[in-house]
Amino acid sequence: MRHRALPLLALGLLVSAPLSARPAATIVPPRWDPEVVSLFESLPVQDAGRVKPLSTLAGFQLLRLRGSRTAYRPDGTKLTPGEWLLDCLFYPEVANTYEVFLVQNAEVLTGAGLGAVVKKRRARYSYDELKDGTHELFKRANVFSQKEAKQRTLVEQQTLDLARNLQDYMALVHALDLVRGGPLRVDGSGGLQRIFGKKQAPLSEVLAKARLVTFLFQQMDAAEGVPQETKEQEIAAIQELAKRIETRSRRSAALRLFAPAEPVDDAKEWLSPYDVVHLSFTGSNDLTRHHQLLGALESMMASRADPAAFRAALTAFHEGAVALASARGEYAKIPREVRYYQRDYFGRALLLFSLAFVLTAISWLRDHRYLYRAVWALTVLGAAAVTWGVADRCLIRGRPPVSTLYETILFVAGCGVWLSLFVEWLNRQRIALALATFVGMGGMFLAMRYEAHDGQDTMGNLVAVLDTNFWLATHVTCITLGYMGALVGALFGHVYLFGKLVGLKRGEPAFYRSVSRMTYGTTCFALLFSVVGTILGGIWANYSWGRFWGWDPKENGALLICLWLLAMLHARLGGYVKHWGFNALAVVGASVVAFSWWGVNLLGVGLHSYGFTSGVLKVLAGFYALEGLFVLVCLGHFLGTR
């Protein structure tokens, strides 16, 4: 539902119209029944070309708007994404009072003439608090959108982001406008009276008889022998009805809730309520079931204050929508995806890894075998949660475990924990176990931060060049395992250098030899998968683009990792470096991996530029600076003690 098209000003003026004349204070939304929420969240919707549950769409919409998947009513009531979306669609007057717009910089508001509503530099605001400044905000956003992204200041980019968030939000709250307002007047002429037999009719009934109305219009337009006054009266009445329908439905295009009746190969795009209205008058397809679904939506809107009637109407809509989607084979994975987000695998894994890390720190102060076992148990449970979550994503998407940057974080973290646990199982020195908790905790935190920063569906459709499961399962998986091995090796290198720096276990050279063996083993592991993955990437490139190697930035990054790991092993074998030097090179290797993994994406050029991620440059620069400073400090200490 992410609409990037500009200009925004016209839309901003359009959607700033009030939804209701009644003040929000007189309308109290219900506490939604869990059964209602469950039915609603499992409704299918097509968004950005992918069929997903409404709960997924709502969750990412909230994530973009307020930076979390939780909303709150003014009285402090906590809302799930599904409950928030229910309020937006059926109680928009009240939803407009929820503080869901995260503004990172108060200058964005002062520039739009909203200085009076500023709370603090970084705060959340409701639509009602921002609506008086939408005209100026969208006007400024139009100006800033003409600049290239690299030329915009931080405030200009944040202004543009807020305008887009307002655009998305208002498209959402207006998505069911066509069923808001009750029946339509259909008594403007004798012809309409004969078709409907009454003065008013629900929109769904009007659409069901739309072809009769169209035929009447054509008949009147071409009729001969009919008094001109009668013709003009009939035509004017039909045009007035069409105008009322258009006015009510023109903003109901945000949610593609209706699967077409045709097979997927014949009609890939789902229909929004506005599409159903348009096709009812102009199309030739059978829309009977879609009109019935619109009738169910009308019943839901009319009975929003009656929980039992609302639940009955929602059940009818759910059954019809699921039947249409199932007939095309597009519903089977929806319940699994709903459960995937409800179970929050990676949030729970973060909790388990954090507890394990705390117990690890306690064990450094007071060694006890029960603490050791508890850390093992918590870490294994955390790794299992990550593995289960990744497996669930594979089943939902029908893809190998790694196909997006977000999934590389999950895969690197999960495999890094398992590799560290394997090393711990081999030597029982508690070093790898401690690192396993750190890898898991850091990886889950990074994944959650990336998801919140990106604000986009992490299971979205792939670009065409990546749409191949074989190469994703071979090349991409091998390359990612190479990243993981090199990073785990770098962590062991950090342990070695830091231990030497602070004098840890100074009289136990066997400890440092053991750490060096861990670094060496994981480096060999990383080299194997990096080389194999790079070669497979060349074969894939030859298959897709007609050349094995083209010195593309991403290809160069993969080659750089291979060359660095080879240089490390050759330096060790040739005696150019010993334990300290080898571990120092492993630490530098973390920066090499970071450059290949994330850095080259910032260039925005080459055949692999589909991996671009904004906002990463400062984080990478900080990482490089910290790693460089750490190595320099350790090097100074090493040279000073020789």
Image (cartoon, rainbow, N blue to C red):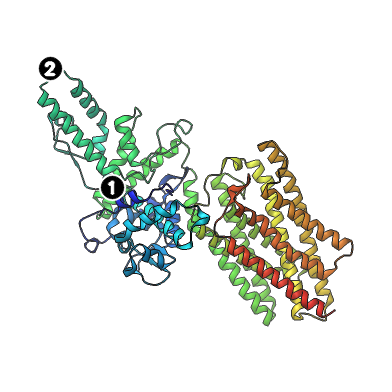
**Residue 615 % position (x, y):** 55, 60
Screen quadrant of the C terminus: bottom right
Q: Quadrant of residue 399?
A: top right
From the viewer's perspective, is 278 left or right of 599? left
Q: Residue at x 80, y 76 (%)?
A: 638
Secondary structure at badge 2 equals loop
The answer to which of 463 and 208 lies nearer the viewer is 463
Q: Quadrant of residue 61?
A: bottom left
Mark 2: which amino acid?
Gly
Secondary structure at badge 1 equals helix
Q: Is residue 483 visible?
A: yes
The answer to which of 93 and 327 lies nearer the viewer is 93
Q: Residue at x 43, y 69 (%)?
A: 122
Q: Residue at x 23, y 24 (%)?
A: 218
Position above or below: 130 against 324: below
Q: Residue furthest top?
A: 225
Distance of mark 1 from mark 2, alpha carbons?
Answer: 41 Å
Residue 177 got which mark?
1
**Residue 246 % position (x, y):** 26, 40
From the viewer's perspective, is 306 left or right of 450? left
Mark toward the start of the polypeptide (1 vs 2): 1
Q: Which residue is mark 2?
A: 225
From the viewer's perspective, is 561 left or right of 101? right
Q: Is residue 32 visible?
A: no
**Residue 560 % position (x, y):** 74, 54
Mark 1: which amino acid?
Asp
Q: Residue at x 85, y 62 (%)?
A: 571
**Residue 595 % position (x, y):** 67, 58
For the residues labelled 1 and 2, say whether their Cβ atoms are less than 8 Å apart.
no
Q: Quadrant of residue 538?
A: top right
Front of the two marks 1 and 2: 2
